[in-house]
Amino acid sequence: MLPEKITAYLADQRDRQLAELVDLLRFPSVSSQSDHEADCLACAEHLAGCLRGLGLTAELRPWRRHPVLIARSTDAIAPDGPTVLIYGHYDVQPPEPLDAWTTPPFDPRVRDGAVYARGASDDKGQLFAHLKALEAFLAARGRLPVRVVVLFEGEEEIGSPDLERFVADHADELRADCAVVTDSQFFAPGVPTITYGLRGLVYVELAVTGPAADLHSGTHGGAVVNPLNALARLIAAMHDDRGRVALPGFYDDVVPLTDDERDAWDALPFDEAAYARSLGVEPVGGEAGLPLLERRWARPTLDCHGVVGGYAGEGAKTVLPASATAKISMRLVPHQRPEKVLAAFGRFCAERAPAGVEAKVTALTQARPVLVPIDSPAVAAAADALREAFDAAPAMVRNGASVPVTELIQRILGVEPVVTGFGLPDDNLHAPDEHFRLDQFYRGIAASAACLLNLRTRLA
């Protein structure tokens, strides 16, 4: 249990905690857009200043486009105890379409018990909860219950490219007894959640090229293969009529669910009809014959995210495009490997592309899937903390998303991470009007503080 002095401090500081979160949310740290490189740097520097203000050392390590922030507790504030690695990311998704926001995405507003801004839930509000938990211990007790290493990156929203090399190169600095990855959400309101499985990712650009330049469709139509038509046929051929991915060997390494997992998921408070209505997609789709949660969490997918080719402006322009491209991702599950799936995708496109065009696949992002043991001391510490802060037993689930650092922590650092989060399913992640419930924020700070205290005991 958290000491009374800590809980009293947290309750007394809520207005300031919210004001400081609003300051953090004002940074338009959009990692995918070059116009915001200076904003990403400013956001990282702001967080470094916050950590230094608590008495931690903090350094920005230049990396690719946006720096990685590594901070560490000193002996003065954490002289003993196990070491806990805390991960979060300060970069955010692009806010477009801007006209779909009720208020501007980087002008945070509080209404109806939530703060609205891009990054409020994913992931600034959640990582900031950890900073406020550290602050509470230092203000109320003058020291932390554990040693702390902080890893905040600025490229998670673009797939954490090259993060594997960064973690490997800085492994000695990042060594810890356990890791807490807070970039997730509750399964449902009132159901705190620990995520023990995440899907991996292969994200590619598929380019189909044909003639040397755009051609008049009247003069040359019927004489050449239209790259846009060829691309459409390729995409259509990637699934069969039952929603299964048609790449040869795609499912060879997929590990089936255990009976215990199926039973646990069946017991979750999940209404498939309500889920479909919330998305406006009745009926739901996907791989036929499997429960919906299994399709979302434990089955691999292949999806097209965008197609560019030819003319899409106002009015008519009758051209056969010289090329067409598509952005495609494959979400992977244990024990699929990105390099094997990528090779299979390349072969599929090369073999299916009609004569007269060439299909080229460029890999943009790769991340491995991960499973975390649910019986580790870190998971037990986090479960007790969530139960204390949110007055409910946590659910153990998988998640269909990818958080690349989780697998890197496990494989390269040899540390079992615990993946949790304080967001809610309707926080509008990656969408207009993203928000973070204030009660989740305040309770999340308490949960983080309780987890640190529990880890001192569990890892002793």
Image: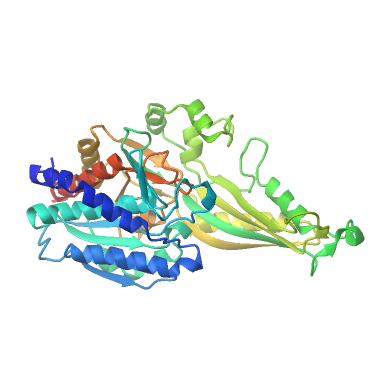
Q: Residue at coordinates 42% horizontally, 58% vertically from top-left?
A: 156
Q: Position of residue 7 (x, y in %)?
A: 14, 43
Residue 165 showing in the rendered view: no
27 to the left or right of 386: right
- Quadrant showing the N terminus: top left
Q: Position of residue 51 (x, y in %)?
A: 23, 63
Q: Residue at coordinates 46% horizontally, 40% vertically from top-left?
A: 297
222 to the left or right of 74: right
Front residue (pair 183, 163): 183
- Number of callouts: 0
Q: Position of residue 161 (x, y in %)?
A: 46, 64
Outermost residue, right side: 219
319 to the left or right of 18: right
Q: Position of residue 414 (x, y in %)?
A: 30, 58
Outermost residue, bottom side: 62
Q: Residue at coordinates 27% horizontally, 66% vertically from top-left?
A: 48
**Where is 122 relative to 273, above or below?**
below
Front residue (pair 73, 96): 96
Quadrant in the picture for residue 157? bottom left
Front residue (pair 58, 102): 102
How is the structure coloured here? rainbow
Residue 385 showing in the rendered view: yes
